[in-house]
Image (spheres, rainbow, N blue to C red):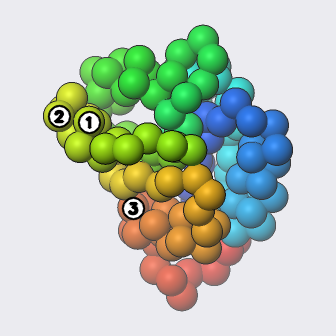
């Protein structure tokens, strides 16, 4: 399968970072849905099928810690990548809470090439597969 066969939902309240995700991941060929909050992301999940969910931890209206239990219940096989500006012990806290659908954690700032590599790994996209 190719990148264009996959839809990624990104929940990020920072408009600048949403643009970075949009530019970088769209260039890879992914279909993107961008949400400015956890609540908006949850609504989007009920509207269209999504293959991967990338979320910031701290967002207004609903943060990742409030959102993940709902995802675990309503979308148990949806893989999740969690991104945070500063959260010491983040991985341990999330695993203690039983969020086993969280594939990996990235601390901001992070290298987009490493995120893209992890996305391909999670979605099982061969590195030689075309963008379209």
Which residue is depicted at the point 70% across and 30% down? 13
Check contact, mark 3 vs mark 2: CB within 8 A.
no
> Relative to residue 87, is residue 116 depicted above or below?
below
Q: Residue 94 location, x and y as percent?
A: 28, 36
Circles 2 and 1: CB distance less than 8 Å? yes
Label 3 or label 2, whichever comes before in sequence order: 2
Res 82 visible: yes
Cβ–Cβ under 8 Å for marks 3 and 1: no
Which residue is disc 1 drawn over? 93
Helix, strand or loop at mark 2: helix
Along the horizontal axis of the image, is 54 left or right of 24? left
Q: Nearer the viewer, residue 34 or 2?
A: 34
Crowd class of label 1 (few under 14; some 14 to 19; many from 20; radius 10 Å): few
Q: Which residue is mark 2?
A: 96
Badge number at residue 130: none
Nearer to us of marks 3 and 2 is 2
Q: Give the percent coordinates (x, y) of residue 105.
A: 41, 52
74 lies above or below 101? above
Distance from label 3 to label 1 (Cα)?
21 Å
In this picture, residue 132 sits left or right of residue 81: right
Is 128 above or below relative to 34?
Answer: below
Label 3: how many residues lie within 10 Å, few (<14), some (14-19) or many (20+)? some
Q: Please name whichever residue, 111 or 11, is drawn nearer the observer in this view of the structure.
A: 111
Q: CA distance from mark 2 to mark 1?
A: 5 Å
Q: Which mark is residue 122?
A: 3
Dot 3: element: helix
């Amino acid at each position: 399968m190719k990148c264009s066969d996959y839809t990624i939902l990104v929940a990020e309240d920072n408009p600048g970072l949403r643009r970075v995700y949009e530019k970088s991941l769209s260039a890879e060929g992914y279909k993107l849905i961008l949400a400015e909050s956890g609540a908006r992301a949850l609504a989007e999940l009920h509207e269209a099928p999504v293959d991967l969910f990338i979320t910031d931890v701290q967002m207004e209206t609903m943060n990742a810690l409030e959102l993940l239990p709902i995802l675990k219940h309503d979308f148990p096989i949806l893989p999740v990548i969690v991104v945070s500006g500063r959260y010491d012990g983040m991985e341990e806290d999330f695993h203690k809470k039983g969020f086993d659908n969280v594939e990996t954690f990235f601390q901001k700032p992070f290298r987009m090439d490493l995120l893209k590599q992890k996305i391909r790994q999670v979605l099982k996209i061969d590195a030689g597969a075309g963008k379209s």
